[in-house]
Image (cartoon, helix red, strand yellow):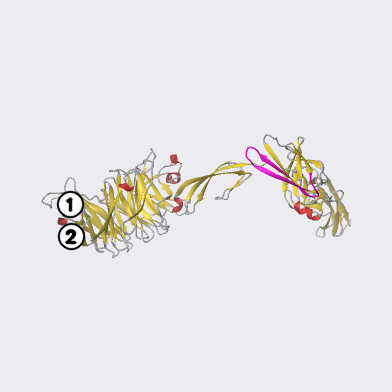
Amino acid sequence: MKAIYTLLIILIPFLGFGQIINFFDLSDDQYQSAKSIYQSLDGGYILSGIVDGSGSQGFVLKTNENGELEWINYYEKDIHSLYPTSDLGYVFAYRENISTIKVVKLDQNGDEVWSNNHSHIFDIDPYNGNYYLKDIKQTNDDGYILLSQVTNYSGIFSDGLTGDIGILQKLNENGQEEWVKYFSGSLYTYNSPEDLLIQNLPLGGFIELVNDGGFIITVNLNNGSIIVKFNANGEYEYEKGYSTILFNDCSYNEWQGITSAKQTLDNGYILSGGCQYDPILIKTDSNGQLEWTKSIDNNSIESIATNIYQTNDEGYVFISRHGLRSTITKFDSVGNILGNLKLWNSANDGDNGIYEIYGVELLALTMNLTNDGGYVIGGKTINTNGENIEPSVFLMKIDNSMFLAPEVSTSYTDCDSIVDPITENIFYESGIYIDTIINDIGLNQIYTQDITVNSSPENQPIIGVNNPDPFSIHSYSCDVNHNNSNYSIYWEIVNGNIISDNGNYIEVQWGNDGFGQIICRERRNSTGCETINILNLSVGEYVQCTTSITQSGDILTAVTEPVELAIGANWYNIQTSNDTTRYWLMAENTSTFTPTFDCSYFIIASNENCSDTSSVYYYAEEARNIGQLSTSPNPTSGNVKVNFDNNNNQFVRLYLISNSGNILDEFLTKNNELEIDLSSYPSGTYHISFNSPKSKGCLNEDTFQKVSNTIILNK
């Protein structure tokens, strides 16, 4: 036998936290695989299975909570049925020979505590008959329940009938038999095989304990399956059948049977199985009465569902297998698919699976729940498509974050920007955007957003007379740079009538004294996006309105008459290039504005009585010319005052320079004078200097000043 080695890969969180995957290479045989897996009471994991394809060698393997090997035992038979016991140990059983089942109890370190052989002397057809172990579980009294089956039993009855016999055997805590029940296709139990009415009885491969201390098993036939309930003493209570007619696409002989069953939180049952191409779910009440069924379309790939469990959120999870492919699927409480984790290379299907994360394909053969609400999965690696993958047994621990919910997509079209309501992303450009989101139940989900952002026309001022006389006629223009074939302009007038409309230009005859308003709607024909430009004005009695701009440091302030007009000031940037003048609205309804670059600006301020447009203000954050520098007293024994011109209250940057040309200090002010304390410097000659800064915007470099003044310090 090949020596065992363990390759541990702990996943750095990709789709979620707490993922573990380990590989255990037990032999050169490609069929080595885990058949049973549980989380043990100490938080580690216990696996059992086969070492080779003949079933002549099996193993029981124990790991710690990180999936690292603690111990391993080898046996001469396939170990497919194992169960953790309440004393931190383990019990398992296997078929010793054609007429004997062996039950073995281990302690937590893997040392054998006891083992017992259980034989039932039947005449078994030596060519076609056999004695099969199905399952073993620990019961509430720390004993054990053992399910097995004899096939092609014959020789007891004088008429020579043959058939299959189920054996339900109760053992005490030391593995000694307490009672045994036999049953056949009639599904009634008997105290000896001589009492049986022999019929074919194809048992399912498991026995499940239920809350009342009893047991359930399944019988699978060609046209459906039966669930059978026994009490704690192995006495028959009831049976319920589920025909293939529950599934419309399932014909005779396509039924693959029920492969697993669990009692649910409502004391009912959830069953999993398959019908040729589709995994199936069956939900019943506590008496086995049907509540609902689900058939999962698997694209005509022969599939069957195994290892069904109810999860903490009252949903379900199972393994579906199709050939050498397996998928873990999570459902809600009524059988709707919430997410999948594919353990095979599904790149051609557009899904991300385990292959994309770990670079290996896995065939899941067993699964169980873990204490933290996650899942532990066992099986074997698959060597497909010529990949150089060592055959090995695997253990994988995952949580809900590894499930990928079905992909969702949406599309949005709007003007200028779009806010996605799910991701809250803001989009300013069209395109296909793909995100991974966490859906309402905590599963990862690929979310595709098809975004179309259409731009609105640029906002433009309405040019024209702001204080028309009553019944006077005046021209107004809006957006003179647009091509009318691409844009449509719609005008609306308050207190007046349009007497001529030439698209960008209109003539308006105003009405009586009072408030007037012009609305210019610019609409992009191809998208319907529009910009609304508004000019408020006063018709009739003349109201003097004035607007201008002042500067203090890097802040521009609207100065208006009347004063309250300033709060409605709209700030525009104006630039002329290649004989084309363009305007950009920079801020609305504010009396102050802080530009982000040096350039030319003007304001339009209006209210219900008047409207005015300021002169263009040439803004620069720092002054370019400060006239002459003067200092006093000079010479000085300590303090000296520096005076200069700063009519726009811009920032002025001055430098104190030594007689050797070194910069000693730097000063920044928005006043027209600066007081400097030189008392910390030694007596000598110093210079106060100013250099024009470079423009940080669109202003031309038409002025540049370099000026300095000498200061004599005499202490």
Q: Where is residue 425 in the image (x, y as percent from the top left)?
A: 58, 48
- Identify the residue at the far left of this view: 158
Q: Name the residue under label 1.
A: 198
Can you see residue 365? no
Is residue 432 shown above or below 673?
A: above
Q: Is mark 2 on a helix, strand or loop?
A: loop
Q: Nearer the viewer, residue 607 or 538?
A: 538
Label 1: which secondary element: loop
Judge by depth and name the residue closer to the eye, 534 or 555. Answer: 534
Image quadrant in which you'd find residue 681 = bottom right
Q: Give the range drawn in magenta.
A: 510-537
Q: Residue 191 carries which label?
A: 2
Which amino acid type is marked by label 2? Asn
Give how far across and how far down residue 627 sits, in percent.
86, 48
Q: Which residue is drawn at 40% across and 46% down?
A: 343
Asked if residue 526 lies in the magenta stretch, the reply is: yes
Q: What residue type is labelled 1?
A: Ile
